[in-house]
Amino acid sequence: MLDVDYLLVGGGLQNGLIALALDQTRPEARVALIEQGARVGGNHTWCFHAGDVPAGLEAMVAPLVERTWPGYDVSFPRRVRRLTEPYSAVTSARFADVVEQTFARRGWHLLTGQRAAEVGAHQVTLDDGVVLSGDLVVDARGPEPSAVEGQAAYQKFVGLELTLSADAPVTEPVLMDACVPQTDGYRFFYVLPFSPRRVLVEDTYFSDSPTLDIERLRREVLRYAAERGLHVEAIEREEQGVLPLPWRAAPPSRSTTPLVAGYRGGWFHPTTGYSFPLALRLAQLIAASAPEALAGPALDRLVARQARQLRFSSWLNRLLFAAFAPEDRRNVLERFYGLPSDAIRRFYAHDTTGADRARIVCGRPPRGISLSMAISRGAFS
Ligand SMILES: Cc1cc2nc3c(=O)[nH]c(=O)nc-3n(C[C@H](O)[C@H](O)[C@H](O)COP(=O)(O)OP(=O)(O)OC[C@H]3O[C@@H](n4cnc5c(N)ncnc54)[C@H](O)[C@@H]3O)c2cc1C
């Protein structure tokens, strides 16, 4: 029976980062990773702000980055703003290359194309009945939309990576172009110009429904691209996603038998859907202690910090999705982008201070707020 120090279940963002952190901090560790897909990382583009990377992990993160831009834009009917916070993108293809090379270099076990059927405290049973064991089992099998308790909204999108026949008129990301019809909730386009002739364009919705009309959104992306002066030569790649944004998010568990990590374990931001900063923090903590010593005060502190942030951000979800009609939700984001850039970055990093939280909720409310609608939809019960 394969027996290792760290048995990582699910080869997505969280466990890939844990493996890279172990490579940096505990090269002598014995590690195995089980992934049902043919490669680790799936089909994603993960973005983060420069300040999201904890001190000590910069060298680990650098090879994952496809492109870093010095700033980015947001665009609303009454607010256009450039933020000067550096912003980086990690593609899953590059992520897979780096993680796979690390496993090969260390002689660790990368079990792709294998599905975990049962995940226990120290053992995992695969679909074919093979049993593996580990001192620490990390269950990061990703979002499970059916498991979201109670009400939830959804962040959903279709993105096309486009090759262009002429240079794109944008050189920096457009994080949100919300100057588009507000159908199916808060809607915006997301534009990442990887190079003058290679651009990712996503049609994104903060919606009450998980239904994704892929064909229609593909057409919408191409229409938007043409309207913005992007001359499309070919569609290189497509990605899509439906991520639950719960109204009430359970805090991460302190249990390490097994440790439930990543999105599945509550290590994500329920308002933005971002999980890169949280996955990095947890990976750093795991790599800092021996498997049997992980349960303890440092993990408790990180869990408590995430639980505090989750309380606030899932409360914001209730406000955003229950107190505003779908077509008015854009007003909330438009107001949010008037905050100081540090507060915006801390919000994305799920690291808000008390002052940030006060700034977000105090003052003149965005147009369209209806507390009676929120109460009737159960936002405060
Ligand atoms: C619209 C949208 C945009 C997003 N943008 C960003 C962003 O810009 N920045 C950011 O930080 N996050 C972003 N996210 C969120 C981010 O993609 C996820 O939260 C993140 O990938 C979660 O990481 P994870 O490791 O928990 O799960 P995943 O990355 O989903 O990985 C889980 C892995 O487990 C595997 N698996 C599942 N079940 C089994 C099994 N039984 N056996 C073996 N393997 C299994 C899966 O195949 C998968 O590879 C976005 C999500 C969406 C939908």
Image (cartoon, rainbow, N blue to C red):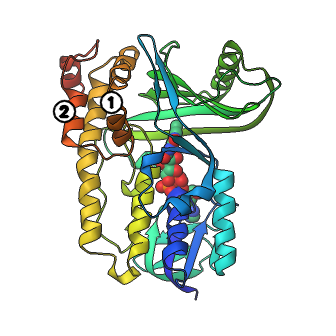
Query: Of residues 238 and 302, which is closer to you in this image?
Result: 302
Residue under numbered circle 2 = 358
Going 45% across and 58% down the picture, which residue do you hit?
280
Q: Is residue 296 above or below residue 182?
A: below
Mark 1 sits near ligand 1, with its Cβ under 8 Å away: no
One can see residue 3 in this view: yes
Query: Of residues 362 and 146, which is closer to you in this image?
Result: 362
Going 44% across and 41% down the picture, which residue do you hit?
273
Q: Which picture quadrant has residue 106? A: bottom right
Location of the C terminus by quadrant is top left
- Tell me the mark number nearer the camera, choosing from 2 and 1: 1
Circle 1 sits in a helix, a strand or a loop, which is it? loop
Q: How many discs appear?
A: 2
Amino acid type, label 1:
Pro
Going 38% across and 54% down the picture, which residue do you hit?
267
Residue under numbered circle 1 = 340
Other-residue count near label 1 (Cα within 10 Å), few / some / many at <14 / 14–19 / ≥20: few
- Determine the CA span between mark 2 and mark 1: 13 Å
- Residue 11: x and y in percent read 57, 62
- Residue 139: x and y in percent read 45, 66
Amino acid type, label 2:
Ala
One can see residue 117 in this view: no
Q: Which picture quadrant has residue 349? A: top left
- Residue 29: x and y in percent read 52, 83
Query: Of residues 78 and 307, which is closer to you in this image?
Result: 78
Q: Which picture quadrant has residue 212? A: top right
Q: Would residue 207 appear left or right of 339 to someone viewing this image?
A: right
